[in-house]
């Protein structure tokens, strides 16, 4: 894992609380990477070089995923929009779930939701919501109450949006508490290949974001 932390304007002095979900997943992810024989490499690069390296690494990381996708995965499902149940069935039976050891669960309530943990990203929790107009996959990054300076944190999120492929940062009320999330959105007519790629990218980007936000937490 390459540490390319942006060193600009990160000067909080107080002890930092850590983001429970994303940071814990990041810790487990690093332990498993270390167990696989991978080593951490720290580089000092310019902001422009950092953005270029991030993009190159993201493209390289997705290469093994192509082996889990077949030609039919790129079909448009005869233009039938996904429903939560159909998507749950498709993801549960896909090679991606089997090879990665992912267990998908359907949560039926006011709005059906698909939940999963990504073992290869430290058991990172992911939620998938399917509406008439979109598929939205998201993962909790941190509670807004953990942020030391909201303006600086929001600026950091906007800057990272440009370097994280397919993912964005958002703010949701979860159980009545403002919470930052990493999310991606797709059309309900998207191929299963695009949806699988979205989930894989979301997991990777959330782990990277959990590292980037640490200097901004209170």
Image (spheres, rainbow, N blue to C red):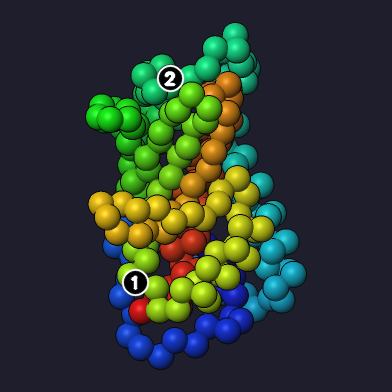
| Picture quadrant where residue 143 is located | bottom left
Which residue does the numbered mark 1 point to in the structure image? 146
Q: Secondary structure at mark 2?
A: loop
Q: Nearer the viewer, residue 215 or 186?
A: 186
Q: Nearer the viewer, residue 158 or 1?
A: 158
Callout 2 crowding tier (Cα within 10 Å): few <14, some 14–19, many ≥20: some
Observer able to see residue 165: yes
Q: Secondary structure at mark 1?
A: helix
Q: Nearer the viewer, residue 129 or 37?
A: 129
**106 is higher (above) or lower (below) than 172:** above
Q: Residue at the spot x=65%, y=78% of the render?
A: 44
Observer able to see residue 93: no
Mark 2 or mark 1, which is nearer the start of the sequence?
A: 2
**53 is higher (above) or lower (below) than 14:** above
Horizontal arrangement in the rendering, residue 13 relative to residue 205 (left or right):
left
Q: Tell me, for residue 84, which label it has, or none.
A: none
Q: CA distance from mark 1 to mark 2?
A: 35 Å
Horizontal arrangement in the rendering, residue 2 relative to residue 124 (left or right):
right
Q: Tell me, for residue 83, which label it has, or none.
A: 2
Horizontal arrangement in the rendering, residue 131 relative to residue 108 (left or right):
right
Q: Residue at the spot x=43%, y=19% of the render?
A: 83
Q: Residue at the spot x=62%, y=20% of the render?
A: 74
- In the displayed orientation, state which residue is furthest to the bottom: 13
Callout 1 crowding tier (Cα within 10 Å): few <14, some 14–19, many ≥20: some
Q: Position of residue 4 (x, y in %)?
A: 59, 70
Q: Position of residue 101 (x, y in %)?
A: 35, 34
Q: Residue at the spot x=40%, y=79% of the render?
A: 148
Q: Position of residue 57 (x, y in %)?
A: 64, 54
Q: Position of residue 65 (x, y in %)?
A: 56, 35
Q: Quadrant of the C terminus?
A: bottom left
| Picture quadrant where residue 198 is located | top right
């Amino acid at each position: 894992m390459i540490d390319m932390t942006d060193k600009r304007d990160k000067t909080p002095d107080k002890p930092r609380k850590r983001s429970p979900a994303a940071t814990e997943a990041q810790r487990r992810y690093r332990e498993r990477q270390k167990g696989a024989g991978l080593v951490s490499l720290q580089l000092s690069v310019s902001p422009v070089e950092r953005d270029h390296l991030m993009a190159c690494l993201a493209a390289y990381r997705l290469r093994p995923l192509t082996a889990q996708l077949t030609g039919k995965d790129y079909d448009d499902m005869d233009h039938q929009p996904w429903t939560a149940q159909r998507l749950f069935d498709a993801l549960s039976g896909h090679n991606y779930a089997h090879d990665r050891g992912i267990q998908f669960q359907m949560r039926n309530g006011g709005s059906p939701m698909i939940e999963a943990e990504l073992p290869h990203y430290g058991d990172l929790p992911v939620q998938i919501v399917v509406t008439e107009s979109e598929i939205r996959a998201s993962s909790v990054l941190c509670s807004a109450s953990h942020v030391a300076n909201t303006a600086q944190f929001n600026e950091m999120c906007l800057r990272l949006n440009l370097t994280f492929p397919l993912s964005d940062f958002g703010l949701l009320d979860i159980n009545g508490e403002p919470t930052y999330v990493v999310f991606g959105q797709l059309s309900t007519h998207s191929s299963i290949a695009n949806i699988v790629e979205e989930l894989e990218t979301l997991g990777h980007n959330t782990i990277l974001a959990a590292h980037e936000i640490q200097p901004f937490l209170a």
